[in-house]
Image (spheres, rainbow, N blue to C red):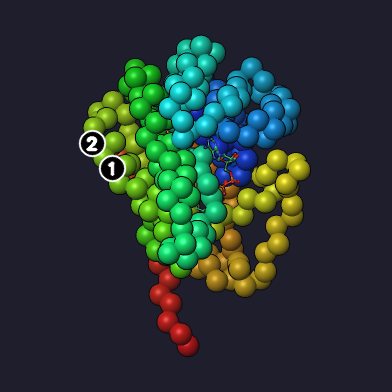
Amino acid sequence: MAKNQTIIVTGGAQGIGKCISLSLLECGYQVAIADIDREAGEECLQEFKNFAAALLFVETDVSQENSVRKCIETIVNRFQRIDGLINNAGIAQPDNGPVEDLSLENWHKVIQTNLTGCFLMSKYAIPYLRRSKGAIVNIASTRALQSEKNTEAYSASKGGIVALTHALAMSLGSDIRVNCISPGWIEVSEWQKSRLRTKPQLREIDHRQHPVGRVGKPEDVASMIKYLISDAAGFITGQNFVIDGGMTRKMIYEE
Ligand code: NAD
């Protein structure tokens, strides 16, 4: 089904992105992992060596235009085509401390990585995605829709991704479909590079508070990715899919 199709996964060397990369390889896709962390990327090449012919790691900083331009060139040199782009790379820590103390530098860093990174990767991949009639999937967050205190930069970056998604879907239709996934709490500690890998420390209450009865797994996101990039999703574009075990549908009042 996925013969010779090439999918880029940004931030694909750890966490949710690593699980996406592995599931796509298992489906027969060629996968280009674009991640800033060389150590994590090289570990992926080792761990996924059964798929060596279909796997490329490109050290990339998605927030830097030159790095993104080189990344796309390297991927096209190796695989000659791009069929899908998963914009997953991000600074995944939402807490920025009190907004009065949030430096402009830290604000820019989060927006530049999480939001501008999606723009830059899309911009340089689009010519190839048009040729293949491909698909883009951006990873936002339920924090695009609801907030805890002290999360302004992260929440704004993720809200921006939801809007960027529908804007791109209009500009790129009918060549490229563009959708977005907003995950809730996804436990990624077992998907980190080996030096940082830990066993999940989840309490019963962490699971129980979710309407589905458990915290999310990277596989929950990966299965939606596989659907959204496939022809089965050919009538879907510009949408945001919330994958959060029902948490954003839960009404919360004090007892
Ligand atoms: P993670 O920290 O485990 O993995 C992120 C990966 O992105 C890392 O490999 C890191 O090296 C890479 N990365 C960071 N900055 C980069 C850059 N400038 N260029 C290229 N690569 C870069 O995080 P995660 O929990 O797997 O999150 C993945 C995505 O999902 C993020 O966009 C995050 O905001 C989003 N998300 C995560 C959760 C969650 O609960 N885990 C919930 C909602 C949304």
Residue located beneath label 1 in the image: 166
Horizontal side of 123 relative to 87 (left or right) equals left
Q: Position of residue 93 (x, y in %)?
A: 55, 54
The one nearer the camera, 99 or 11, is 99
Question: Where on the image, by quarter, is ligand 1?
Answer: top right
Q: Residue at x 38, y 19 (%)?
A: 128
Q: Residue at x 28, y 42 (%)?
A: 166
Residue 195 in view of the camera? yes
Q: Position of residue 17 (x, y in %)?
A: 56, 40
Q: Residue at x 73, y 47 (%)?
A: 197
The one nearer the camera, 76 or 117, is 117
Please tell me how crowded label 2 is: few (under 14), some (14-19), or many (20+) other residues with Cα within 10 Å.
Answer: some
Q: Is mark 1 within 8 Å of ligand 1?
A: no
Residue located beneath label 2 in the image: 170
- Give above or below for 189 relative to 75: below
What mark, if any, has residue 247 been given in the picture?
none
- Give above or below for 96 relative to 57: below
Q: Are marks 1 and 2 in contact (CB under 8 Å)?
A: yes
Toward the bottom, the furthest residue is: 255
Corner quadrant of residue 69 = top left
Horizontal side of 240 relative to 148 (left or right) equals left
